[in-house]
Image (spheres, rainbow, N blue to C red):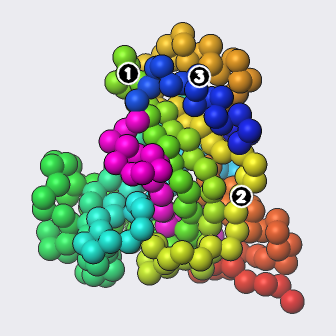
């Protein structure tokens, strides 16, 4: 976690070593909005696995970016964590085809055919298998603004800064691009993520030390659920993965 009052000095320190990724660079604000609807079981098993600190766990989500546009593409994603190692499987689908795909399971009819990801069909099959086998359902919408960078001399090193994290419960597939969200988390702070297939270079270790940044296991999904529950102590999770007020 990075205090917002350290964000400008941190950007300045990183500047000589990184470049914006192409998605952030094409926007005037040099950032983009990430939108994710997380799926879970009726008993919120994925959330509980995070609380229990399981070594191996997964997240199932629909991810979209920026405001809604005609023919917007979203992604079916499975994010698997095994200790410090993370793998992600994703498959693209037009947003307008998302509900028909999940209803019919007809991958060939709905998965985007102009994407060059050769694994898209297999990834979609994985996603649908988990959703159906575990009876998953949409649970909560999480969104934030992201600044994203690649290291100039280490192409396997990616650094992101996620700000203004907020969420909406009672999420459904129809809410992915809605604008009204009633809970913000981490006021005054943002999250710095480092994604790397290599050992951290010396310049990055030095910067992390200068800003006293320590590695933490953070889950935006779990933090958003915790935030809803802490702000409304009478809020409890019910069997459909949504919330209600106890009376």
- The residue beneath circle 3 is 13
Q: Seen from this angle, which residue lies furthest top?
A: 202
Crowdedness of circle 2 by 10 Å Cα count: few (<14), some, many (20+)? some
> Which residue in the structure is indicated by mark 1?
152
Distance between mark 2 and mark 3 Cα atoms:
26 Å
Q: Residue at x 14, y 74 (%)?
A: 109
The CA distance from mark 2 to mark 1 is: 32 Å
Identify the secondary structure beneath mark 3.
helix
Q: Secondary structure at mark 2?
A: loop
Depth-wise, is mark 3 or mark 1 nearer the camera? 3
Q: Quadrant of residue 123?
A: bottom left
Mark 3 and mark 2 in contact (Cβ < 8 Å)?
no
In the image, the segment drawn in magenta is 20-47
Disc 2 designates what residue? 185
| Residue density around tag 3, few if under 14, some if 14–19, many if 20 or more, within 10 Å | some
Sequence-first disc among 3 and 1: 3
**Looking at the image, residue 94 lies above or below residue 119:** below
- SS category of the residue bearing label 1: loop
In the picture, measured across the screen, residue 105 lies left or right of residue 83, that is: left
Rendering coords of residue 170 (x, y %): 60, 79
- Asked if the residue at tag 1 contacts the one at tag 3, i.e. Cβ–Cβ closer than 8 Å, the answer is no
- Residue 82 seen in the current view: no
């Amino acid at each position: 976690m990075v205090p917002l009052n350290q964000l400008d000095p941190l950007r300045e320190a990183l500047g000589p070593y990184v470049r914006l990724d192409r998605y952030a660079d094409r926007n005037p604000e040099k950032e983009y909005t990430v939108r994710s609807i997380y799926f879970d079981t009726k008993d919120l098993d994925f959330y509980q696995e995070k609380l229990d600190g399981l070594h191996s766990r997964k997240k199932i989500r629909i991810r979209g970016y920026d405001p809604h546009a005609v023919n917007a593409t979203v992604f079916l994603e499975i994010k698997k964590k095994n200790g410090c190692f993370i793998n992600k499987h994703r498959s693209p689908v037009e947003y307008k085809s998302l509900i028909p795909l999940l209803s019919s399971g007809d991958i060939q009819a709905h998965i985007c055919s102009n994407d060059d990801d050769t694994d898209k069909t297999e990834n979609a099959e994985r996603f649908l298998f988990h959703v159906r086998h575990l009876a998953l359902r949409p649970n909560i919408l999480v969104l934030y603004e992201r600044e994203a960078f690649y290291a100039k001399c280490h192409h396997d090193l990616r650094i992101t800064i996620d700000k203004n994290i907020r969420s909406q419960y009672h999420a459904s597939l129809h809410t992915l691009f809605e604008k009204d969200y009633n809970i913000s988390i981490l006021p005054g702070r943002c999250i710095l993520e480092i994604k790397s297939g290599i050992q951290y270079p010396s310049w990055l270790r030095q910067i992390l030390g200068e800003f006293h940044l320590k590695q933490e296991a953070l889950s935006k999904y779990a933090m958003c659920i915790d935030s809803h529950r802490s702000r409304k102590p009478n809020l409890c999770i019910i069997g459909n993965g949504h919330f209600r007020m106890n009376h």
